[in-house]
């Protein structure tokens, strides 16, 4: 989390898409670190939203950063939102920089402003927060793999790249194709080396569905029974084994019951004996 040269403590939460859960995950991390005793500040370099909150000094910041500051138990500051865009129809958007309106800009005028000032505004805001807090939890916007705007994307991995600090990537399993989304984002985005972890959000049901050890029981049975098990187009276990038949079900059940009784004899019975002796 810390840049070894500058000592900046920054972690960024990126998403495979909008509404992947970045704001909520960021808020949770802010709360967690705050409860650990750290002085934590949320940060978002660029946001497009009509939901803003007025804060002390006559400034306004996005509601999401206001809530994240609340979760971090710290007063909301204008530096927590570098650039906020408030759409105003076809005429363009109101551009708010560090809580103060710069007026309504057309898309061309905004891009010119972004090229001339965007990176400086983001870095100055980030530096201010780093100087006054122990940890900055930055939130991305949309996806870091938007190849059509990658040359001017200051909302995503650019923040982590300033000081080579780590990021995590959030995917929403409710949308379907979460693994393709995570993989594709990593392949398309710049500086994917800074992504140090992934979060699958909105997961319901059994955690075993995401357990990387799911294949071990199948592999163990395949070896014990000398069976060849294949998933078309995916994998083959014990390629030199025999094709499974209905009779192998009984063999597998015998192994299951045997392993269960061995477990009882080796682990459960000794523990029960020790507990009995301890209470005599």
Image (cartoon, helix red, strand yellow):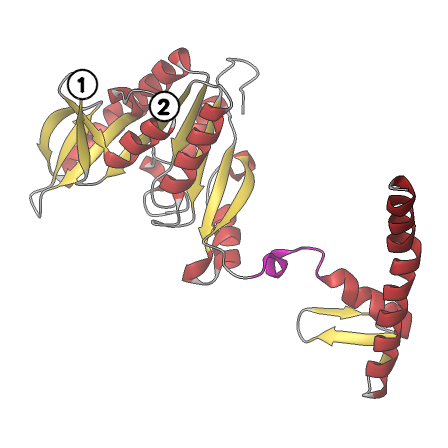
What numbered label is drawn on residue 56? 1
Question: Which residue is at the front of the view, 271 or 243?
Answer: 271
210 inside magenta stretch: yes
Question: Which residue is at the front of the view, 74 or 52?
Answer: 74
According to the image, label 2 marks what residue?
73
On the question of residue 241 being in view, the answer is: no
8 inside magenta stretch: no
Q: Quadrant of residue 22?
A: top left
**Where 6 sits versus 208, above or below?**
above
- Relative image position of residue 158 (x, y in whole percent): 41, 31
Q: Which residues are magenta?
A: 206-214
Sequence-first disc among 1 and 2: 1
Q: Is residue 116 left or right of residue 248?
A: left
- Relative image position of residue 105 (x, y in whole percent): 11, 34
What numbered label is drawn on residue 46? none
On the question of residue 19 being in view, the answer is: yes
- Relative image position of residue 276 (x, y in whole percent): 89, 47
Packing grade of label 1 (10 A; few <14, some 14-19, many >=20) is few
Q: Is residue 262 left or right of residue 112?
A: right
Residue lying at the far front in this picture: please name it.
280
């Amino acid at each position: 989390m810390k840049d070894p040269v500058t000592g900046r403590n920054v972690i960024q939460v990126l998403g495979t898409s909008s509404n992947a859960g970045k704001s909520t995950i960021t808020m949770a991390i802010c709360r967690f670190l705050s409860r650990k005793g750290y002085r934590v500040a949320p940060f978002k370099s660029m946001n497009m939203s009509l939901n803003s909150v007025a804060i002390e000094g006559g400034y306004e910041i996005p509601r999401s950063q206001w809530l994240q500051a609340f979760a971090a138990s710290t007063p909301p500051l204008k530096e927590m939102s570098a650039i906020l865009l408030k759409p105003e129809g076809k005429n363009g958007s109101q551009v708010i920089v560090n809580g103060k309106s710069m007026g309504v800009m057309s898309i061309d005028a905004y891009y010119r402003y972004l090229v001339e000032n965007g990176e400086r505004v983001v870095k100055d805001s980030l530096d201010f927060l780093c100087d006054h807090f122990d940890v900055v939890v930055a939130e991305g916007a949309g996806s870091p793999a938007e190849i059509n705007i990658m040359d001017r994307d200051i909302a995503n991995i650019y923040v982590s790249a300033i000081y080579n600090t780590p990021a995590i990537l959030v995917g929403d399993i409710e949308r379907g194709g979460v693994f393709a989304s995570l993989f594709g984002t990593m392949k398309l985005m710049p500086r994917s080396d800074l992504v140090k972890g992934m979060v699958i959000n909105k997961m319901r049901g059994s955690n075993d569905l995401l357990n990387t050890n799911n294949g071990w029981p199948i592999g163990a049975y395949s070896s014990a029974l000398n069976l060849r098990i294949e998933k078309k187009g995916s994998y083959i276990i014990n390629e030199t084994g025999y094709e499974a038949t209905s009779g192998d079900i009984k063999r597998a059940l015998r192994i299951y019951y045997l392993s269960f009784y061995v477990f009882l004899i080796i682990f459960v019975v000794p523990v029960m004996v020790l507990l009995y002796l301890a209470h005599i």
